[in-house]
Image (cartoon, helix red, strand yellow):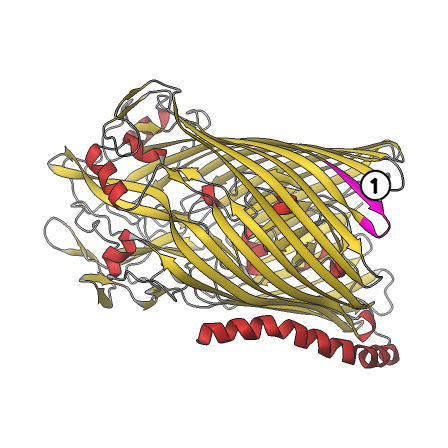
Amino acid sequence: MGKSRNLFYAMASIPVIAAFLVQAGPAMAQDAEEKASSSPGDIVVTARKREEDILKTPVTVVAITREQMDIKGIKTMQDLAASTPGININDSSSGHADRSFQQVILRGMTPSTTLATTTSLFIDGVPIASPSAFTAISAPERIEILKGPQSAYFGRNTFAGAINVVNSIPKGEWSGSATGMVGTRSNYRVRGELEGPIIGDALTFRVTGEKFSKDGSWRNESNGETLGDQSTATGTLLIVAKPTDKLTIKLFGMIAKDDDGPSAQTRILAQNIRDTNGNLIYASQSNCVLNGNPYICGTLPRTINGVSANTTVTTNLRNLLAIDTNRVVSPEDTVDHYGLLRHTRHAHATLDYELNDQLSLSVLGGYNREKWSTLIDLDGYDTSMLASPFSPDGYFDFPYVIERDNLDWSTEARLNFDFGKLRGVVGASYLYARTYGALASGLSTASNTSYSKGGKDQSETKGAYFGLTYDFTDQLSLSVEGRYQIDKLASYVSASGLTVRGSQFVPAGVYAPGTLLAEKEFKNFTPRVILNFQATPDLMVYASWAKGINPAQFNTGILSQTASIQQAAANAGMTLTVDPEKLTNYEMGVKGRLFGGSLTYAVSAYYAQWRNQINSILLTVPDGTFTNGIENVAFVSGYSNSGSVDLYGVEGQFAWRPIDLITIDGGAAFNMTDIRSFVSPTITALTGITDYTGYEMPNASKYSANLGIQIGGNVKGQENTTWFLRGDWNFKSGFYTNQANTTKTSDAHKFNFRTGATWGNKSLQVFVNNAFNNKAYTSATDNWTIEQGYRYLSTYSAVLVGLPELRTAGVEFRINF
């Protein structure tokens, strides 16, 4: 009853706000003229594949400009999420919390896997299929965050929304900048930008280079090294050709390298760990018993066991990393230390041709390649005191190698038209994506059989779309959009072949390398209808209805397991094919200006029905084999259509410049998730709960907000000299670790401060991020207590948490030329 009341209030709030603003607008405008306030400025976005004023775009979209990124210190996707209400980023998966994994969560739509991403990334409208390939942000013109299903225009994996990074376009004049930053914990960043003419305005270029590095905020108590070290090097080149006034061609390329140390993470244990003599090594922090299982309930505490990990690269590990059999990443390109090594490549080309005053043609093509490997300590703590005569190193340890090779390319063509009252776009697109993966354990002596390489998983997506907008009057417009999409998925046997030992999913037998294991085609139509009313020149009201589809996937990874494990997976609800997810979204919004334009605002309310939800199935099953007298345990993962969720909320943002000296901006979001049905044998085994009706989705903050206050202006008596002082408060409420809502993180309140001055072509900034040293966990997922006897793997027995970056201070200097 309470949730229904919240939904009613959320949806009813928009008409009430709009009615108030229509009545109050003239009086506020008159008052504003008397105050002679200044406008925060206009922002143009491309949320509907054409340039539009953000305040006249009937879509929930947040735009962060280059100037705002600089003044707020936004450098990474994590920074972007922290400063934007309604977004969470989860970097925790399968025993590690690092930059190899990145789930972008909009409006509480938590994806179950990187393959089922609900929010896609784009550069200049060109898709990046892998969500982990883009973690650093290097000097774009702006970033657009589109909320709600964007399938009609952006296609695949835009179930919850899309994030589009828009490049700065070089001008026909020489200019550039050099930026340097130094900070605490060996933080540094250097960036250079240069743009200018090659052939006047007809051929211009822009090139950037950036290197960033920092030591982690946490100390490994086993050896004193820092955990959470990160390093990124990025280079970009943009060439723009304008052979005629009607034709523009853009060529963009980006290369990047991420080289990180051991991640900043730890486990909160629900079981004690003892050595072979019975001495307590790590203590349980269990405070409850669920279904007979000790666990951690309520708000997660700080760890009492400290933060530690095995991070010594032993001779056995060096031998493991040097093996060339069944690899996805060659030994020459693989990580050689605990941590992550990733190489990414991106390239795209766009062509825009103005056929006449009413018609224009756009063609896009893109390519992405991402190869990464990570070496993690899967047990999650220093186990050097747990003697084991059977281990290659004399003590229990669970080093684990994960590697991926992702590739995608895409092409798109669209025709834009504007016939006065009728305008819009028609287009077609194609996307091909494929991925390979491999795993290896360092539990035993390294050999040519250590690595397990999966076969190729690929998808082909063909789509045709349209968007039509008709102006019935100068104030009332109707937009009808749609995309017909065909997804063809296929999964193949790896180069080493496959012996299927059970018939639960496919016929048992021996499958030759490259054999097609599974293939299926899915056809869907995703429409969107928007009605918007420009009540006054400074007030727009809109309402929309949209459908969204998230692609299907296969569970072919289970086929390499024993027949008994395949049966256990089938009993848990796993099937070979997982069907697409579906979303129906209803939305209302109001946007506009007040006080003569000094205040801009946008408020939206939504209600969405997420059906056929894909959820993960995680099993720990004895596999019938033994190592040194101990039965081995298989960690089995898969997916099923086992959920249904209702989502609703209210989101808003504003920017206000009451006087020239002061700027205030902020936003807030209430994002509620309401599970209607859900099945998880793993969570049920832990909690005993079978009916999840009314519970909330994990890894998503219900409440979030940000507020920034900036003062500044010209320095009196000094020509071309300005100063500023800014403070930002970023808030995310705690989120649950599972759908049973047994465990959650604490609220995160982070305060950032920045001050600086600009004189002529030089600027200097001093900053402190996370000034009050908030230590709220950045991610949290249910996991296991892993020790030498494997005694606590039948149910979840720990929580894996990501640790935040602590207080960081620094100085940044820039010179423009």
Query: Does the stretch in magenta take in 418?
Result: yes
Q: Position of residue 230 (x, y in %)?
A: 49, 45
Q: Which residue is rendered at x = 55% and y = 38% of the image?
A: 129
Q: Which residue is mark 1?
A: 171
Q: Residue 455: which quarter of the image?
A: top left
Q: Position of residue 531 (x, y in %)?
A: 71, 60
Q: Quick check: can you spot residue 729? A: no
Magenta extent: 414-422
Q: Is residue 745 above or below residue 31?
A: above
Please name whichever residue, 284 or 226, is drawn nearer the observer in this view of the structure.
284
User: Position of 383 compared to 72: left or right?
Assistant: left
Q: Quick check: can you spot residue 218? A: yes
Q: Secondary structure at mark 1?
A: loop
Q: Which residue is rendered at x = 21% and y = 42% of the image?
A: 621
Query: Does the stretch in magenta take in 269?
Result: no
Please name whichever residue, 498 or 123, is drawn nearer the observer in this view of the structure.
498
Q: Is residue 56 above or below residue 104?
A: below
Q: Magenta stretch mostly in which secondary structure?
A: strand
Q: Which residue is rendered at x = 81% and y = 64% of the image?
A: 475
Amino acid type at circle 1 is: Lys
Q: Quadrant of the N terminus?
A: bottom left
Q: Quadrant of the C terminus?
A: top right
